[in-house]
Each structure stands twice: as C-alpha cells, then as structure tokens.
Amino acid sequence: MDTQTSADTGTDTGIDVVALERRLRGAVRGEVGFRPRDRALVTMDASNYRRVPLGVVAPRDADDVAAALAVCREYGAPVVARGGGTSIAGNAVGVGVVLDFTRHLNRLVGLDPEARTAVVQPGLVLDRLRGAAAEHGLTFGPDPSTHSRCTIGGMVGNDSCGPHSVAWGTTADNVRALDVVTYRGRAVRLERNLAVVPGLQEFVAEHLATLRTGGRAVGRAGGPPGGPAGGQAGGVRDGDDAPGAYAAGAPGPYPRDLPGWPDLPRRISGYALDALLPERGADLARAFTGSEGTLAVLTQATVRLVEAPPARALAVLGYADESAAAEAAPGLLPLRPLTVEGMAADLVGSGPGAHALPRGGAWLFVETGGETPAAARAAADEVCRAADAVDHTVVADPAAQRALWRIREDASGTATRLPDGSEAWPGWEDCAVPPARLGAYLREFRALLAAHGLRGLPYGHFGDGCIHVRIDFDLLTAPGVARFREFSGEMADLVVAHGGSLSGEHGDGRARSELLPAMYGDELVGLFGGFKDLWDPDGALNAGVIARPAPLDADLRFAPLPRGPVPVAFGYPHDGPEGGDFAAAVRRCVGVAKCRNPAGSPGVMCPSYRATGEERHSTRGRARLLHEMLAGEVITDGWRSEEVREALDLCLSCKGCRSDCPVDVDMATYKAEFLYHHYAGRRRPMAHYAMGRLPQWLRLTAALRAAGAANALARVGPLAAVAKRLAGLAGERAIPPIARVPLTRSLRRGADTDPDVLLWPDTFTNYLSPEAGTAAVRVLRAAGLRVGLPRGAGKVCCGLTYVSTGQLDQARAVMRRTLDALEPEGGGSGETGDAGPPLVVLEPPCAAALKTDLVELLPGDERAPRLAARVRTLAEALETAAPDWTPPRLDRPVTGQTHCHQHAVLGDAAERRLMAKAGLEGRLASGCCGLAGNFGFERGHYEVSAACAEDQLLPAVRNAPGDAAVVADGYSCRTQLAQLGGVQARHLAELLAEGLPEEG
C-alpha cells in the first residue's frame, strides 16, 4: 500500500494514496491529478507557507464536489478548497486533496439587474462578474487588487474587501445566500435560518452572553481590551450619517450594542459569530463568509450588486509623510468617497505613473463618482478643498487614472523587494485599526520594526484603517524565524492595543490564527472551536486555520530550499546578497498571479497561460515547479525533470514577466538556465540545432551564395515537409525566404567613415529582412548622421537564438567573440561616449539580448556593460543623436504591435514620440505575436502560437482602418502577420523611408 507521510506531523497518515486516486477517478467527472506536477503546482499560495497535498481534483459541478468529499471521507483524507491561489496568509494550502474550482465551477449562473443580484459559482473570476454587471451599470463592490484573477469563492472564504470598501463594504456585506456541502456530505443553503446546521441554535442560546460581549479580549501580555464598545459584525458601518458611511444603496446599519467586539470597519479575523445573534438577523451567510474553507465547501453564491457611478475622478493628495496622510484620511470620509487609499514615497519609487503625483512624501488616492464627468470632477475638487494637503491634483482622464492605480495594484508584488533589493515577505500584510487611530498606530508600528531591526513599506486602505506591508523577515535561518515569531507576538499586542483586528482583509490563515487569543481572549476562541465542530466534526477542512491553529512559524515555504548557491550559468545580479542565487531568483514569485490575467487583458504576460488557461503554463506555475525542483521533495529528479521541461516548453521566452510581473520574475532566463542544465551532455531536440544555431546556417548559406537554391527547394512542398520534419519544425509553417544579398554585403562599400552611429547587423535583418536595414540607413542619413557598420560585422552576434534554446556555452562563446570584435573601436572607461559610437539595433529581441543576456551571461567581463550601454533603437538614436531632425509627415493611422522584448526591456516611449511627429496616429497593440523567434516554428507549438496571435495582434490589425499602416519592428511579428493574417507589416524604418524624398 502506497501511503503518504503528513507534512504536518512527519508521521505516516495511513492513507492509501493509490486507492484514493483510483476511487476519485471513478467517482468524479472532473480531472484528478496526483502526479508530482499536479501536486507541486498547489503546494503554495501567495503566503509564506508551503504544504504538500496528496492530489488535486477539479470538480465539474456540485455533484462532483459531493462525490469527491465522499471519497475523501471514506479514506480519511483532508480537503482544502482553492480558488485563484492568491491568499496571502496561508489560507489555501494543505495536505490531503485540493479542490480546484477555477477549471470548471467558474460560471456566472445568472444576473438579475432589477433585483441587483447575481448567482455565481465559486471559481468565477471577479472581473468576469464585474464585466457582466457593467453592462447594466452595476458592479460587485469588493474589488481586491487581484480582481483580474481572484475568484468569488476565495473572496467569500477570506471576506475580501479592496479599495472600494469605504463605499460598498466587504464581501460579507454583499453576500445574500450561500450553497455549501459539508465534509460529511450535507448540502445546505445558508441564509437567515440557523436550524439548517444541527445544534447551531442551541450553541447560540447557550453562549448568548459571550457572543454579545465578545468575551474579554485581553492581549497576550495583559494588554488593553480588544477595542472600544460598539463593535460590528464583519465590519458593517454604523449608518448613513456616520463618517465613512456607505454610498447610496449600501446595506443598512447594525446596532452598536456589543461592547466586546472591536469597533472598526475591517474586522476580518476569527469567525463572525456575532452575526448569529437574533438582533443581527441570525445571518448564517454572513457568519460563514470569512471562514476560510474551514466549515464547508462552497458550491454557489448569491451576491448583491451595487450601482456603479457612470463617471469617476481621482483626487491625489500629497502629504509630508505617511502619518500625516493617515491622520487626514478619516476627515475625508464624510464626503462619501469611493476610495481613500494611501502610500508613501518609499513604495512608489519611480514606477509607471509616479511622475504624475503631486509634491509630498506620501499620498492619498481619493476616488469620487458622479453621474457625469463634471459631477465626478466637482466631487474630487471638493475633496481637495477639504484636505489639508501639501499639494494635490485631480486626474480625470481614465488612462491616467489607470496608470496611477497600477502603482497601488502592483504593490503586493513590488513591496516584496525593498529599494536595496532585499527580500520582504507577508505575515503582517493587512492589520486594521479604527481609522482615527491609524496615524498613531503607524508611528508605533514603525518603531516596533526598528526595535527588531526590520524594514517594511506600509500602504493600503487608509480610509478603513487597513495597512498592507511586507517586511524583510529572515525566514531562511533559525534565528530569523525565531525573530519572526517574536515580532508577530508583539505586533499582535500592538494591533489589539489600538482596538484593531489582526486581519483586515486577507483572513487569518496560518499566519495569524495562533494569535487570535490576543484579540478575542481564550473564551471566545474556544467558541470558535465549538462552532467549527458543528460543521466539521472530523476536523478535515483546512485544518490548522482559525480554530485549533497550527504554529505560525511551521511549514514555511523556504525551509526545503537549498541553503548554498546552486551552480548556474547566468549571473542573476539582483538575486541574493552578492547575486548569482538561483533560489533567490525563483523566490521572486510570491504568488500574486498577475500572470493569470485572462486572454484579452492588457500587457504581455503571460501569453501561454492566456492560450491554454492552465496553471502550469503561467509564470507562477512554472516558478512553483522550479521551486519544487530545488526543494527536491515532490519533484525529485532536479534539472533532469521532464515535468518541469514540459511546463517550460510552452514558455515563449517573451520576457513579458520581466516587466509585467510586479516582482520582475524573468521566466525566459529561468527557462534558458533550465534547458542548459537539462540537456547538459545529452542530445537536444533537433529544433535547437536548426533554430538555435540559425546564425551559423544563415552565415554559411550567404558564404556559399546559396540563398537562391535554398529558397527554391523550400518552395517544393515534399522537400520542405521532409526538411521541416528532420529539423523538428512545425509542418504548418512556411519556411521564410533568405535574402539573396545580406545587408552587410550591400552596405559594406557604402559605409560612412568616422560614423556617428553603427548599424548592428543582427541575424534577422542581415539575412532575412535587409530591406529594413536599408531603410534605416536612409532615415539616419536623412537626419544628418553618418552610418557605419561594426568592425567584423560578419562575426558579431547577440547570441539570442543560443540563449532561447539554452545553449549557453555557445552563447557565451558568441558573445565573447562579439566583444573581441568590437572592443578595439572603443575601449573606454564604461561611459557610452568613451566606448564607441551608439549601436542602432533594429531587431528588438537582439537589442534586449545585448542589454540583458550579454551582461548576465558574462558577469565578470567589464566589456559587456560597456557594449550594453551603447545599444539604441532607431527611435532612440534619432532622438539623442539628431534631436532637431523632423521626420517626414505620413499622416495616416497605424496599427500593429510593440515587440514583447521591447515592451519588457527597452520600452517604446521614443517610438511613440517619433510616430507622433510623423503623424502616425494610433496605438500599437501589446502582447506577444506568438511566433517569438524559434518558439512558433518548433513542432508542437503551432496551435499555441496561433492562439497568442489571436489574443491581441490579429484582432488589432483586423479592426484597424483600411488605410492603416501595419508596423511591427520585430521580424517574428512581421512573419506571424504574413503567415496567419496575410498582412504585410513593415519596420518603422521602412515607413519613414517611404516618406523621404527620392534619392537622386
């Protein structure tokens, strides 16, 4: 019998895993996954915790849920319900069987705009509900920053909130009815009837006094009570006239007569047992919300929708520091804003949108709504007049608002790296205090951090008194973990002393459940255990959370990782105290899962996930597999792992995660590193030799003057089919033609002496698309610049194709040869002006490789950063070397795509400015074309490649005006458009050259 050892106790659980899996496969219609890959993908959420499950089940409907629970009950297997896996407190990790609702139980069952309600399944992503509700002028009020990937089931489990809770409340305020199944198989509908749970009415009657007083919540060290009199269940507001009251249409007030419960809008910790009281309406659905999957499994929810204001404006208020901003926030609540969010300069840095902030060391983002833009603007102006701010601005443009909100929404990731690059972690991510106490609380919190030698970047929902922060805990060593535990206890006392809640948004999970006695006292916490027993007497649902908690320092995710450096090829300069730490690079992924944004979302990351919808094809999923590969417990064959290779196989190496991921995970580099080790000493796939060594084959073809013959053979169908099969290429792809005359051959004689700029002869431009290079030379010379070629132009190469296929030894050899060829031209001290003329690189992925891969693969070669500093795109070169030049006016619409590597590494601001000067109107699509160099040509990738193109690029071109110019600076993008869309796209250089006067 194959039994499993418990990750909690280290003892044999006695569960027959093989029989359990077999029975589940026979009982449920959804997928059942017990392979190492399936388990590795769900060992962690977005918290500090890791637990290894037995397997994963993706039920298709409520009957499947019941069937899965019946089998688990038969075998004594624990169960954890999981949504988007973005929980920050360790709410969704566990041993036993994980139920994944995102694959099938993810429908919007119905929406009633008249009643303003929706019926949803637990795996429905919040933005899908909001999108459907928006068609009727409605929305679902709670909107955490993970709204594009978090699920309604997870929101019910954690009682999620988001920035608009000052207007529309928490999830508990917006739940009307819940359908659940208990571990023992009872299907129950939760509304306002306690009788549906056997023994619950008697439980409430027996403990009525304690439930009304909340017990005597005394701090761990004998601190003050847990808050002033007048608490509320689940954070419900006091009434329309109170500061911070809900906007119109909000739920009605609860009475202020429960003296022991913390009186604050964000009491998420513990079970909301006071919602069971008769004077609270015996609201069983509210009491269940926030129970974190410990009571029963949710299968359907009926939720309340609210009217969304047709127009919004954003007042941005600058203050001297975060305490001043925090103290100002409560005074703005009577103006009934939609949000009052706060953050300080140490979080904002110089990220996107930062330039639009007014003067100050901290800011409040106060959103207002109205029936018209003018009304929303007037409300924002009123906020500015009422605020005692150092400076302020009102942002009315929706795009500008989105840029500012991105700073806030990405904070849960960006805060994991402090300004000096050190790591910071959750654990005290979302404490809440009464808003009037927030300023004083923040000062004492900063002092407590300093006393422990810790640092963090607070931000969050200042209008609700809820602060998010990631702290630079050392969770890798025993002394560091001990300090984490000591700080947690003192932090709990501090929160309680201010009348606060240990959790104000994300729930208790494994991070804070142990500390609940500090907030509620032993008597009430004992009732939590009794309440759970009424629902789950077997203790099988999400054990160790809220009731009978696990230690907060147990099962930390970093414990199984190697303590010493892992030998790697790349330098990883920003990972680890001295760089070069691959484990630290993998730790970058904290699980906020922005990479799980669905198809059609803005940005690039993650194209393969958008195409397949499978977690293993997301950046987070791949990072999880690499984490488990390093841990060696679930995935035991290290770099040779076929399961890791298979997950990375569909990574396009688009580098979108390098910019779109809030913590700059660079899966393209991790993939190259893995492939390097995976195939060390072994035969590679033929596509690696065919496409990875493309520069060699094209250079040889040019030397033999064989381009014409090669093209003729490629047009012979049977011969081309055989060639593609032997080379490991996709049969659906046409072989692109090779230029008869390479760019270097045509330009060598006409190159200018003493050049102002050098045109980089990348492989794609030189051998496959020389017309782009010829056009670029015309444009540069029209701007008054002398153009030359690098010395040894036939030898230089960025190494891109070798890197993308993991042939890193060859890549380094190619890069060193390039540096040897170029160094005599400069050889200065490292400043661009001393190192030689700027290098104009027309192919974005080659420019990105010179900027990043070159430096990171040759970390000890001082020539590499000198060369990287010389790299310019065409637009950058024109802007810096010929700033007074005016491009020809083309005056036509434009469509196409910004190359994914340009988006991720280079940026396209100079290109946008150049197109505007040329009268090219329109915005290029983001995303990835799907061809991505060798990826789309490799056998087995065609369908995913085509799906990526259909995500943004092809629709943008189809929907463009008929006279639009199609721009794509990347050769892959142009090839994809030609092969899948029948569209001839051009490099921006070609468009500009067409507008120049004919050469005499």
Image (tube, rainbow, N blue to C red):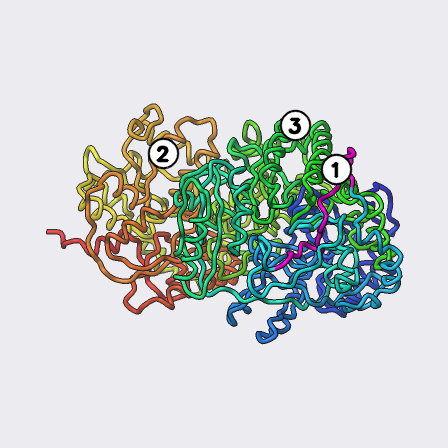
Label 2: element kind? helix
Q: Position of residue 96 (x, y in %)?
A: 79, 52
Label 1: element kind? loop
Question: Alpha-carbon neighbours of circle 1 within 10 Å: few (<14), some, or many (≥20)?
Answer: many
Q: Nearer the viewer, residue 361 or 988?
A: 361
Q: Nearer the viewer, residue 144 or 737?
A: 144
- Residue identified by numbered label 1: 224
Q: Position of residue 288 (x, y in %)?
A: 75, 59
User: Which numbered disc, 2 or 3, marks the residue that appears first in the sequence?
Assistant: 3
* Disc ID at residue 761: none
Q: Say if the magenta span includes residue 165.
A: no
Relative placement, left or right, of 498 versus 548 is left
Mark 2 vs mark 1, CA separation in Å: 59 Å
Please report contact status of discs 2 and 1: CB closer than 8 Å, yes or no.
no
- Residue identified by numbered label 2: 869
Q: Which residues are magenta?
A: 218-239
Q: Say if the magenta span includes residue 226.
A: yes
Magenta region, mostly helix, strand or loop? loop
Q: Residue furthest left?
A: 1000
Q: Residue furthest top?
A: 829
User: Which numbered disc, 3 or 1, marks the residue that appears first in the sequence?
Assistant: 1
Q: Position of residue 801 (x, y in %)?
A: 45, 45
User: Which numbered disc, 2 or 1, marks the residue that appears first in the sequence?
Assistant: 1
- Residue identified by numbered label 3: 452
200 up-or-down from 405: above or below: below
Amino acid marked by disc 2: Ala
Mark 3 vs mark 1, CA separation in Å: 23 Å
Amino acid marked by disc 1: Pro
Total marks drawn? 3
